[in-house]
């Protein structure tokens, strides 16, 4: 029984090998191109194969059946061929193509898919799933990078869990939960220590500080640090502070008598952003010391 052809450019019957997908599509490929990209396929092409007389009429063209479906193989082979690379938009696509790339040792596809797996947009859409895919494929460094980046997003224990979780052992998911809890605890201790010794914040008003001299203001410790603690409780990541507009505003000023003109507000806002950046850097440095132990 003949199988339908895969999409172009893998429907050219002048090719010298046929790869059958698990859902019975025929990929007509050039052995030289696939062999250059994959030492696994190169070895497979050297083995005796079934002749393709029932589909191509050419007994010299071998057929190689594989376990991947047509969508996965099309994306994988497009990466190998001198054509436009496929766009991997979903975690499911990245997972399937990356698994195949690792299986067939296609370095160029591994690089492209790993970069897609680590993309901020994909992690934001399903950071637990991205972590699970990395763990499933034994990519521990990538799993740690995903877990670190995902600290900026809260972890929801309600709703439908990521489909990818069913592919990893319970201890790997527990390791992720423990990692986030440890990061949160360490950051909370850091914030407590910072709140015990709050420096005066210096600022320059672009209007009434013509000589470039600085003035200082005191931060409302209780109001400011309570908000810091709240923000970092479930998302122990420095960028969370920088994205909070209220913490970078004049609401943290304890004594408003320091404001002499409307332009002082701009100077205070700039100074508060610098103050927040310093705290955010301390938070990120603290978190970087926490190890995620997957094994």
Image (cartoon, helix red, strand yellow):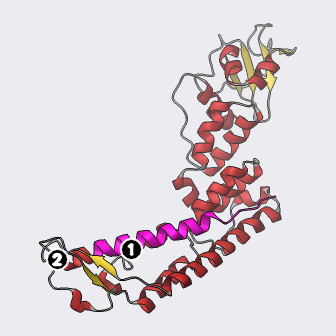
Main SS of residues in magenta: helix
Between 6 and 175, the one lying in front of the other is 175
As measured in the structure, the alpha-carbon distance from the residue carrying label 2 to the one carrying label 1 is 19 Å
The residue tagged 2 is 263
| Tag 2 secondary structure | loop
User: Residue 282 in the image: x percent, y percent?
Assistant: 52, 70
Residue 291 counted in the magenta span: yes
Question: Residue placed at 68% from the left, 19% from the top?
Answer: 36
- The quarter holding residue 221 reads bottom left
Name the quarter where the C terminus is drawn.
bottom right
Q: Residues within 10 Å of mark 1 (few under 14, many from 20)?
A: some
Where residue 140 appears, as percent x and y from the top left, is: 72, 51
Q: Residue at the spot x=80%, y=22% of the render? A: 64
Marks counted in the figure total 2
Q: Is 21 left or right of 199, judged from the image as shown?
A: right
Residue 115 counted in the magenta span: no
Left or right of 33 on screen, residue 243: left
Residue 275, label in figure: 1
Q: Which mark is residue 169?
A: none
| Residue segment shown in magenta | 269-295
Q: Is residue 243 above or below residue 165?
A: below
> Local crowd at mark 2 within 10 Å, few (<14), some, or many (≥20)?
some
Q: 147 or 224, which is in the foreground? A: 224
In this view, 209 is above or below 42: below
* Observer able to see residue 126: no
Q: Secondary structure at mark 1?
A: helix
When the figure is inspected, residue 225 is found, relative to residue 16, above or below; the finding is below
């Amino acid at each position: 029984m003949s199988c339908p052809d895969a999409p172009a450019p893998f429907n050219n019957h002048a090719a010298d090998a046929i790869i059958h997908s698990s859902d019975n599509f025929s990929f007509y490929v050039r052995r030289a191109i696939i062999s250059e990209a994959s030492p696994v396929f190169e070895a497979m092409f050297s083995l005796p194969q079934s002749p393709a007389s029932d589909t191509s009429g050419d007994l010299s063209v071998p057929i190689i059946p594989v376990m991947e479906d047509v969508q996965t193989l099309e994306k994988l082979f497009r990466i190998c061929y001198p054509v436009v690379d496929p766009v991997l938009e979903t975690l499911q696509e990245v997972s399937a193509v990356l698994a195949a790339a690792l299986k067939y040792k296609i370095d160029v596809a591994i690089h492209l898919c790993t970069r897609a797996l680590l993309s901020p947009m994909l992690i934001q859409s399903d950071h637990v799933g991205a972590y699970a895919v990395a763990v499933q494929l034994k990519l521990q460094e990538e799993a740690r990078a995903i877990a670190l980046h995902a600290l900026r997003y809260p972890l929801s224990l309600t709703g439908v869990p990521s489909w990818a979780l069913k592919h990893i052992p319970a201890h790997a998911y527990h390791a992720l939960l423990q990692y986030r809890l440890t990061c949160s605890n360490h950051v909370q201790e850091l914030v407590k220590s910072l709140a015990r010794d709050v420096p005066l914040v210096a600022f320059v008003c672009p209007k009434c500080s013509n000589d470039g001299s600085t003035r200082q203001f005191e931060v409302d410790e209780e109001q400011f640090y309570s908000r810091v603690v709240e923000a970092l409780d479930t998302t122990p990541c420095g960028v969370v502070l920088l994205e909070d507009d209220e913490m970078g505003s004049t609401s943290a000023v304890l004594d408003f008598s320091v404001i002499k003109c409307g332009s002082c507000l701009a100077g205070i806002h700039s100074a508060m952003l610098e103050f927040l950046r310093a705290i955010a850097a301390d938070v990120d440095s603290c978190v970087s010391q926490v190890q995620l132990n997957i094994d």
